[in-house]
Amino acid sequence: MNDIFRIHAEDSVAVALHDLAPGDTAEGSGFSAAVREKVPNGHKLALRRIEKGESVLKYGWPIGRAKETIEPGCWVHSHNMESQLEGLEHCRYEPQWNDLEQKPPVCFDGYRRTDGKTGVRNELWILPMVGCVNGLAKQLERLASSRLPAGIDGVFAFQHSCGCSQLGDDLRHTQKLLKGLLLHPNAGGVLALCLGCENNRPEDMQALLGEYDRDRIQFLVCQECEDEIEEGLRILDRLGQYAASFHREPCPVSSLTVGLKCGGSDGLSGITANPLVGSFSDWLLSRGGSCVLTEVPEMFGAERLLMNRCRSKPVFDAALGLINGFREYFMRYGQPIDENPSPGNREGGITTLAEKSLGCVQKSGTAPVEDVLLYGEQVKTNGLSLLQGPGNDLTAACALAASGAQMILFTTGRGTPLGCPVPTLKISSNTPLAEKKRNWIDFDAGQLLTGSSREKLTEELASLVLSVASGKTRAKAEALDKSEITFFRDGVTL
């Protein structure tokens, strides 16, 4: 096994694959380096002299600049390196992408809904239209769980604090995300639970939905009935019988949309887990499926790689607006655009946001970007879409679910039990994490460092995804609580 890993031939740093000590000779693939000082596992080792002010290269791209001259064999981190990100992004459209070779279609066993969408679960959802009815929603979940008909995967109430005392874009964001969840194909039936006096009025949500299946989505206004629990159970009984009429049947993988997310990254995330998910993305897209990449702040520093993959100039313009819109959001509040990485990211070896971003965007594979979605919008075209959303784990995961993703691939180097409304598979960047947190981690991408080929692991990951989509396997997070949802907020609360 090698001691260090150089991602690109032009990189001025390599990543330590285990703790390095002064005096060690660190072996890489076809090169070696004399270690001058302690370098923790996952952190960066200088391969050559880096002058003060010079860009530090990783992935073949600048990830920051040296705050002081760094000698070969030295540890490179926040003590001697800083971010170069600032201001808005200005670039021209220079297309650099290739269409994937189309592969033979494959199928999974899913639920075909009347609106043409496909679900991978057949659940009943109780979706509060305002946080005031959270307690009622949980009580209905508890009572309804004991009277579900056969063929239903469970009843789930999703709690949040929004829907009232909101104005402008905040209220619209709440409504758009709720709309996406109301229409989500993983729910065979949905109870939209309203109070009756909230800003998010039932009639507004119904108008936003447009034409919808009233057998599948039903509204209950608690202030308008004498016993909301009794009435709620009656509605859930009807929804349960309706949902039970659906059965799994072969569905083309072209009907599958997978959300791409990472959290708690470490220095190996950009070497193992994220590139492996990128390979899976290409696997799915080459078979007509769809992927959605969000976490816009974690595109900062790597945006040109994504924008030049845009299918057309209008898509490029939308992607540029997506990036600069989020940069302006940071600047409007007087916050640095490179505040990320988090403390856990830094401890794992990531120094700057550009470094994190260059690893993060690898989850999207190599396919062209077909579309750019605003927060709360649903996927409109097959292929790779970029989605407006922050990096916060739960907020981003909920946005992916509302976009229509039936499941999420979530890479992590630190580990998390996070769940959201859709099955969320955790993919570890390193084997020790996978072995320690077997109740969290679904797939170990750290095997890439111990001899397993990316091609083999891509096929294994694809097989796992299809098994989860077919209901044969459950994501580890599905055994945990997934009752909380959250929204992207940027405005006044009354």
Image: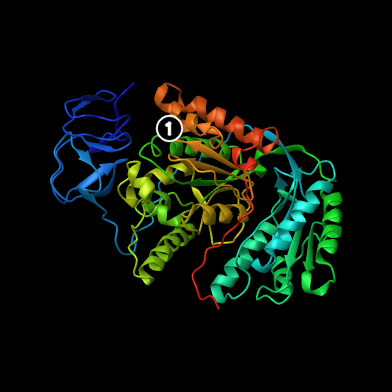
Q: Is residue 44 left or right of residue 186?
A: left
Instruction: Kindly identify the residue that appears in the image at 19 percent across and 47 percent down.
Output: 80
The front one of 260 and 315 is 260
At label 1, which amino acid type do we have?
Answer: Asn
Q: Is residue 209 left or right of residue 317?
A: right
* Residue 463 rendering spot, x and y as whole percentages: 61, 30
Q: Quadrant of the C terminus?
A: bottom right
* Residue 250 rendering spot, x and y as whole percentages: 75, 36
Give the quarter of the image for residue 61: top left
* Residue 209 rendering spot, x and y as whole percentages: 71, 65
According to the picture, the residue beneath numbered tag 1 turns out to be 430
Give the quarter of the image for residue 327: bottom left
Q: Is residue 492 left or right of residue 59?
A: right
Report whether residue 165 is seen: yes
The front one of 65 and 341 is 341
Q: Quadrant of the N terminus?
A: top left
* Residue 477 rendering spot, x and y as whole percentages: 60, 42
Q: Is residue 145 left or right of residue 469?
A: right
Density class for disc 1 (Cα within 10 Å; few <14, some 14-19, many ≥20) is many
